[in-house]
């Protein structure tokens, strides 16, 4: 196959189909502010070297109006810069937190490689790291750890999670 530039790939019918799928799922409204009048963009959450636009999973894309798209790109750039400047302990803690946020496949096996990683999971779950460490030997998957965490006492010092902020 002849080499194609990324811009050429974006014009390909396969990508056009994917783009339409994202727009349709969002009912042609900005997923951030609900705007239906401003030009809509399909935001690409991340890039991997050599991967074609159509090969990304659907949850990598978001339908956004132009102003929201600019804002989201700004926030992502800041977040990526911040992750890049964390020390090795905090980066593991952040990875543990992100792994829980991203646990869209509940049957995936947990790869808790350091105590800091487990601390990040505990931050997300609102439980003590020590309690989670004790349970981890009996849990293989994210589904199992979520179930176990429900039975654990809440850590009083735990930071607020998104759920806590939106529950009235
Ligand atoms: Zn918007």
Image (cartoon, grey):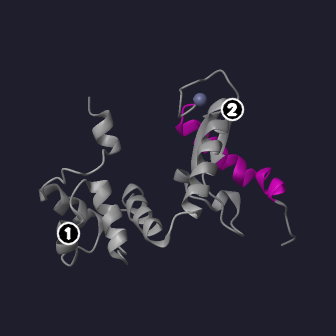
Mark 1 within 8 Å of ligand 1, using the beta carbon: no
Tell whether position 55 is magenta. no
- Residue 155 rendering spot, x and y as whole percentages: 19, 54
Residue stretch rendered in magenta on the structure: 6-27
Location of residue 115 (image quadrant): bottom left
- Residue 112 rendering spot, x and y as whole percentages: 35, 74
Mark 2 within 8 Å of ligand 1, using the beta carbon: yes
Tell whether position 13 is magenta. yes
User: Residue drawn 84% across and 61% down?
Assistant: 5
Where 67 sits versus 92, above or below? above
Any part of residue 134 in sight: yes
Q: According to the image, label 1 marks what residue? A: 130
- Residue 93 rendering spot, x and y as whole percentages: 40, 65
Any part of residue 106 in sight: no
Q: According to the image, label 2 marks what residue? A: 66
Where 92 sits versus 164, above or below? below
Q: Secondary structure at mark 2?
A: helix
């Amino acid at each position: 196959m002849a080499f194609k530039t990324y811009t050429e790939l974006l014009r390909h019918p396969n990508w056009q189909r994917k783009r339409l799928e994202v727009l349709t799922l969002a009912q042609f409204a900005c997923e951030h502010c609900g705007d239906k009048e401003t030009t809509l963009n399909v935001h690409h959450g991340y890039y991997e070297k050599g991967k074609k636009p159509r090969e990304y999973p659907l949850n990598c894309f978001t339908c956004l109006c132009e102003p929201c798209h600019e804002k989201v790109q700004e926030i992502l750039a800041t977040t990526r810069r911040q992750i890049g400047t964390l020390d090795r302990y905090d980066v593991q803690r952040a990875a543990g937190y992100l792994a829980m946020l991203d646990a869209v496949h509940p049957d995936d096996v947990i790869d808790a490689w350091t105590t800091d990683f487990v601390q990040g999971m505990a931050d997300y779950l609102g439980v003590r790291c020590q309690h989670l460490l004790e349970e981890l030997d009996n849990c293989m998957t994210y589904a199992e750890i979520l179930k176990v965490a429900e039975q654990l006492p809440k850590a009083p010092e735990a930071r607020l999670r998104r759920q806590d902020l939106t529950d009235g």
